[in-house]
Amino acid sequence: MKESILACLREAGGAGKTPAEIARELGVLKSRVQSWFSSTGKKCPGVRKVGTGRWRFVD
């Protein structure tokens, strides 16, 4: 799950993506992606919140 989400965020560029957009691309429930961001995602280096419900990957 981690690698798939990070790949989506890298692909999105500076604009980032919402958990709903990522869930649609990966074919998983939005709640699973939101849960990932609230627990694991905020601890991952490079993953930054850029707005309300929008995340991006920073190198």
Image (spheres, grey):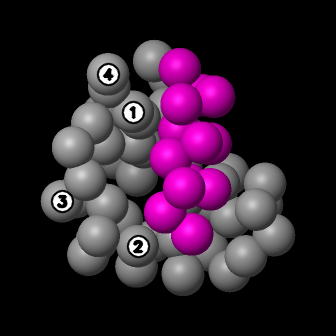
User: Residue 33: which numbered mark, if any?
Assistant: none
Circle 4 is placed at which residue position? 59
In this rendering, would 41 be left or right of 15? left
Q: Secondary structure at mark 1?
A: strand
Q: CA distance from mark 2 to mark 1?
A: 15 Å
**Placement of 45 over or under 3, stated as above or below:** above
Q: Residues within 10 Å of mark 2 (few under 14, many from 20)?
A: some
Residue 49 visible to the viewer: no
Q: How many C-alpha atoms fall within 10 Å of the one at disc 3: few (<14), some, or many (≥20)?
A: few
SS under mark 3: helix
Q: Reading the chain from its start, which is encountered first: label 4 or label 2? A: 2
Label placed on residue 43: 3
Q: CA distance from mark 4 to mark 3?
A: 15 Å
Asked if disc 1 and disc 4 are in contact, CB closer than 8 Å, the reply is yes
Q: Dot 1: within a 10 Å radius of its alpha carbon, few (fewer than 14), some, or many (20 or more) residues?
A: many
Dot 4 or dot 3: first in sequence order is: 3
Q: Give how far across and how far down residue 50 sits, in percent.
A: 30, 33
Residue 36 is marked as 2
Q: Which residues are magenta?
A: 1-13
Q: Which residue is mark 1?
A: 57
Q: Is residue 16 visible?
A: yes
Q: Badges 4 and 2: C-beta atoms under 8 Å apart?
A: no
Q: Say which of marks 4 and 2 sits in front.
A: 4
**Nearer mark to the viewer, of 1 and 4:** 4
Q: Earlier in the sequence, mark 2 or mark 1?
A: 2
Question: In the picture, which quadrant includes the N terminus?
Answer: bottom right
Q: Return the disc, 3 or 1, that comes first in the chain's sequence.
A: 3
State whether residue 54 is above or below residue 59: below
> Which residue is more in the foreground, 21 or 39?
39
Name the residue type under label 4. Answer: Asp
